[in-house]
Amino acid sequence: MKIIVVGAGKVGITLIENFVKEGHDVVVVDKEEKSVDYIVNHYDANGIVGGGLERQVLLDAGAESADFLIACTSRDELNILCCVLAKKLGVKRTIARVRDPQLFAEIDSMREYLGLDLAFNPELQTALEIAQALKFPSAKSVDSFADGKALLVEFDIGAKNPICGKSLMQISASYGYKLLFCMVIRGEKVFIPRGDFTVMENDAVYIIAQERELAAFCKALKIFKPRAKSVFIIGGGKIAYYLAKELLLGGVAVKILESDKARCEELSDALTDATVLLGDGTDQTILDEEGLKDSDGCVTLTGIDEENVIISLYAQQKSVGKIVTKVDRSSITSMVKKLGLETVVSPRNVIANRIIMFIRAAQAEFSDKMDALYILNEKVEALQFTVGDDFDNDGVPLYKLKIKKDVLIGGIVRDGEYIFPSGDAFIQKHDKIIVVTTLKQIRGLSDIFKAGTYKSK
């Protein structure tokens, strides 16, 4: 696929890095020559210096034959207009970054008129991911499938964890819950485990199950934490706004600490049910006086990674139940996790998953619809598909289907109910299927089956 990325900022660079890994032909457009040179020198991509609203610049970038154009500059209006121009020049599909809450709220009603195929909001998507983590704080990370009917959660296994040293078959026999251990990370190695796999100390395990099954399992292991009922947010940017709005809808008490007075006033007007405080999030006295230690959750969302890390470490010292740290620089993410800060989010990575999913879905040859994509690490992905009318194996038990090696069916959701993927379970048209795999560039269900299992009618 030929992809043009307009805007070489943080989001643009992350997208380009992922597109190159996926084997796409990438061209970056940016007014800053240094930014273009950096991308051309660090990635297998071409570059054009110029503006996204310049007709000749887009033509030089190959707009007439491009499959996608993604406009992700810092200006919403420029991104939208760039997509309008690109569509007229021949780009097949366009995607715009739209961050303003009011504009984004109206964008769906204008997309068809503008010729816009997708609008994405990194701050909103990040806020929704953080909200999900706060709903199930027992886990290190939480991803949701089929509108929350199934969760994919990550746990670190300590020496005192009761499942340490046990095989998956032993764990199943001991606890009896319907849990699917879909991935284990051990050092630099990644496993999609079988029943005889033994869980060891310091493993990171990923489990798919219904929330009630996971909650019961966590209680049995004595690692259960109830949903956060009060959350302290440090930093009052767009992510904080969207997160507070989402939490307030769920009945969660929200405090926001922001250092800019004008922004505090904006948040107070927009979020009347939240407590908005003026102050520096790195000021220990303010955090103590405003009751950080009494909060169920702390989310650090300032614009400086180092501040977020320091505040999160202080919240950890105060025994806050769930701590979420925003880190923009991927180079320090692994270091942050080694400090014991388990739940780390990056807006860039959140939105990269969303756009990669959209592009892969556009490449699919069958009628399956890709609903979700989570890149768990460089080797493993978790995906969700809605089964299309091309599927020829309705009612065939999973154990009879010829599924490729290194592919795991993580669950089936039918009529809003999660079905555990036992050997006797089967797939029907219009089911939602969760897949975990080490195979690269899965675009549809046809890619997970061996030849002759899935064919078009």
Image: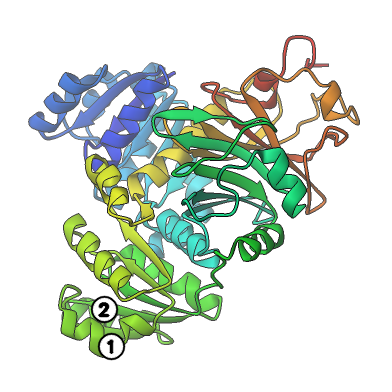
Judge whether residue 269 can be spotted in this image: no
**In this picture, residue 344 sits left or right of residue 393:** left
Q: Quadrant of the C terminus?
A: top right
Q: Distance from label 1 to label 2 (Cα)?
A: 9 Å
Question: Residue at position x 56%, y 23% from top?
Answer: 363
The furthest residue to the bottom: 289
Q: Nearer the viewer, mark 1 or mark 2?
A: 1
Say which quarter of the image contains residue 408: top right
Judge whether residue 10 can be spotted in this image: yes
Residue 454 higher or lower than 295, as above or below: above
- Disc 1 marks which amino acid? Glu
Give percent across and percent down for residue 308. Answer: 23, 62
**In this picture, residue 95 sits left or right of residue 373:** left
**In this picture, residue 258 sits left or right of residue 298:** left
Circle 1 crowding by C-alpha within 10 Å: few under 14, some 14–19, many from 20: some
Q: Which mark is residue 257?
A: 2
Question: Residue at position x 32%, y 64% from top?
Answer: 238
Q: Which residue is mark 1?
A: 290
Q: Which mark is residue 379?
A: none
Q: Quadrant of the N terminus?
A: top left
Helix, strand or loop at mark 2: strand
Circle 2 crowding by C-alpha within 10 Å: few under 14, some 14–19, many from 20: many
**In this picture, residue 297 sits left or right of residue 317:** right
